[in-house]
Image (cartoon, grey):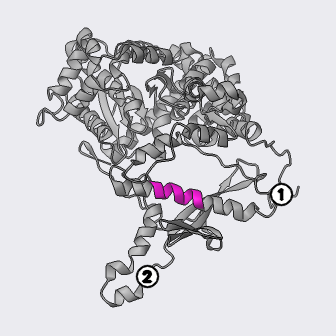
Amino acid sequence: MTDIIWQVEEADDWLRYGNPWEKARPEYMRPVHFYGRVEHNPDGVKWVDTQVILALPYDTPVPGYRNNIVNTMRLWSAKAPCEFHLKDFNVGGYIQAVLDKNLAENISRVLYPNDNFFEGKELRLKQEYFVVAATLQDIIRRFKASKFGSTEVVRMDLTTLPDKVRQLGSSLFHVNTLDCREHSTQFVSYLVVNGVAQIHSDIIKDTVFKDFYDVDPQKFQNKTNGITPRRWLVMCNPGLLIHILVQRIGEDYIRDLSQLKSLLKFVDDDALIRDIAKVKQENKMKFAVLLEEQCNVKINPNSMFDVQVKRIHEYKRQLLNCLHIITLYNRIKKEPNKAWTPRTIMIGGKAAPGYHTAKMIIKLITAIGEVVNNDSVVGDRLKVIFLENYRVTLAEKVIPAADLSEQISTAGTEASGTGNMKFMLNGALTIGTMDGANVEMAEEAGEENLFIFGMRVKDVEALDKKGYDAMEYYNRIPELKQVIDQISGGFFSPGEPDQFKDIVKMLMRHDRFKVFADYEDYIKCQEKVSALYKNTKEWTKMVIHNIAGCGKFSSDRTIAQYAREIWGMEPSLEKIAAPDDPR
């Protein structure tokens, strides 16, 4: 949640009343060892005097879509071997009596603990080791008799090990065996190395692992991420499903999203254009009511819903969005009688607990909103909303209501993204850089049906070589200078003029993500967005092209590619009857 303009973390005790879908499996509990020492003897090496934590598995069923197949997701909970020490309790050591229980359960108590201090770093490392150790023991237990190595594939989704290790800090443990061979060890031990968008895979091949790619190119693959259409269309946008898609192309696209391509034959159909615009407006009305009921925020449902929802991070460039908001605000103030396209700009997401800059970005967003939303000259032509506690439940409401999707990371920094795909499937147009999956979205829908701006990867690389000088942009672009001066001068924080000095200092002196370099092109692109939004027919035709181009971005396709091309599996053609099915 945000308290006025600060993010404040609160515990979400989602298991307080239990989870009816999960089942504890104590019979498969595994011990996980920490600390201790290594003892050398004639029989070999032994790990002794360890702290033992028990890993208790919980199984959750994951059903397929109308195929009578259910997989199992196994999660682990940390438990102490002895949860209560009566001896300590009897002598008044009430805290010591339950200390082991609390220390053990801390491992699975909080996701992403603050790692700005030693204890947090240690806990993060213990969490990762706990999950890996428990899972590997479970795999070996089940398959060591006959099938180990032929039935199990271990998939790792992470950045490179050296990055993770170095983030922990040398004070935590001595990294004396990890040197320039670290990447080599990882590469050789992997069956396949894959990126999750074509641009991501290209960067891996061209830079990170270039030498290895030259030696063994077959080891590198691309598997572009995808989203499930059942969750992100059927469930969250029934109006689009029932009134538009089913009536025109049937229901088979729910299993085969590529069939959305057939929607293109209706692209000039006035009835389809009218229906899509109608469903979008209904979704916007519902979301406006939701915001007013739950957040006491009133917005204009006839304005453009301009949405950027994702974790708050410098590379996601919520700051670039802020610069546009202030620029637009200044323009409206300067020419209040101009026919401006009304906008409601919504930004949502959470900052990591220890990420100070991200928390300051949230504070800046809400401070800008406080000024803009209370300016009578601006009125309903511009509103700025920070969506508190952004989560899947809220995403299912705001994504179907969005007109414009902001995907504005610096080119070369976003591995893929999936939020961009969710917006695309639900009829929002994308303004974005050629980064992550945006590149392939432009290929599938046609680049002319997205609002693409900014540097490409090679432009960023060239700017790095030349040297990025933020002052050059600041001095050359008057509107940018005005915006930065307003932030640094306390216009949005009159009670504390220096409140955002750290953000300004970062932007001016050590901005790794080059916000100023894309500012001018971003503003021009936003002008095109505003102009086109007034033409409902042309805007909606672009929406149709985007929905029709979503076929590639189904998680069904992604998982099928992993299965065939990495795991060596083919789909079963056997039809499994339901228990009450006479077949």
The numbered mark at residue 84 is: 2
Q: Determine if the magenta segment contains residue 129.
A: yes
What is the count of numbered marks? 2
- In front of the other: 448 or 85: 85
Give the mark nearer the N terminus: 1 vs 2.
2
By secondary structure, the bulk of the magenta-drawn segment is best described as: helix
- In the image: residue 554, left or right of residue 275: right
User: Which label sits in the foreground, 1 or 2?
Assistant: 2
Relative height, residue 86 to residue 485 (above, below): below
Q: Quadrant of the C terminus?
A: bottom right
Label 1 – label 2 distance at C-alpha: 51 Å
| Residue found at the very far front of the displayed protein | 42
Q: Residue furthest right?
A: 583
In this rendering, position of residue 91 left or right of residue 57: left
Along the horizontal axis of the image, is 398 left or right of 576?
left
Residue that carries the numbered disc 1 in the rendered image: 581
x and y percentages locating residue 41 in the rendered image: 60, 70
Q: Which residues are magenta?
A: 125-133
Contact? badges 1 and 2 (CB < 8 Å): no
**Local secondary structure at mark 1:** loop
